[in-house]
Image (cartoon, helix red, strand yellow):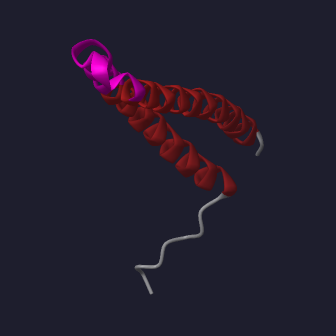
Amino acid sequence: MADEQPEKTPLEKLKIVVSQLKEMEHYARSNMEKLSEIWLLLEEDFRKHKALAERANDLLKAEGALEDLLKLVIQEFDKQCAELEKKP
């Protein structure tokens, strides 16, 4: 059966995971930009919606924490990839 794919190595699998995490980080950054826009709209244009602006700010903080954690995990996984690449 010529169409069968060979089993991926642990390094290849790890690189796939890193790629997926980097994509998640990109979307987290995009979400932060959108949340910032919402926060500004609620905070500056609609002062009567202070409680909603605070909730949007809570989301912004949580998304920022997620992005920071993703960066750390990506660095760790990249380091692991580099170590696996050194091995024969």
Asked whether 55 or 88 is in front, the reply is 55
- Relative to 40, is 70 above or below? below
The magenta stretch spans residue 34: no
Counting from the top left corner in percent of width and height, residue 76 is at 70, 33
Where is residue 46 drawn, in percent x and y? 24, 19
Q: Residue furthest bottom?
A: 1
User: Where residue 63 sits: x, y (%)?
Assistant: 50, 32
Numbered-mark total = 0
Residue at image coords 54%, 32%: 62
In terms of depth relative to the viewer, which is nearer, 19 or 53?
53
Determine the residue positioned at 47% across, 78% down. Answer: 4
Dividing the image into 4 quarters, which one contains the N terminus?
bottom left
Does the magenta portion include 46? yes
Give the residue drawn at x 44%, y 34%.
28
Task: Give the image location of residue 48, x and y in percent.
Answer: 29, 21
In the displayed structure image, the side of residue 43 where residue 19 appears, left or right: right
Please, what is the dominant secondary structure of the magenta stretch?
A: helix
Q: Where are the magenta residues, as a range? A: 36-51
- Image-quadrant location for residue 49: top left
Q: Nearer the viewer, residue 55 or 26?
A: 55
Single out the residue that lies furthest toward the top: 44
Residue sitting farthest toward the left = 45
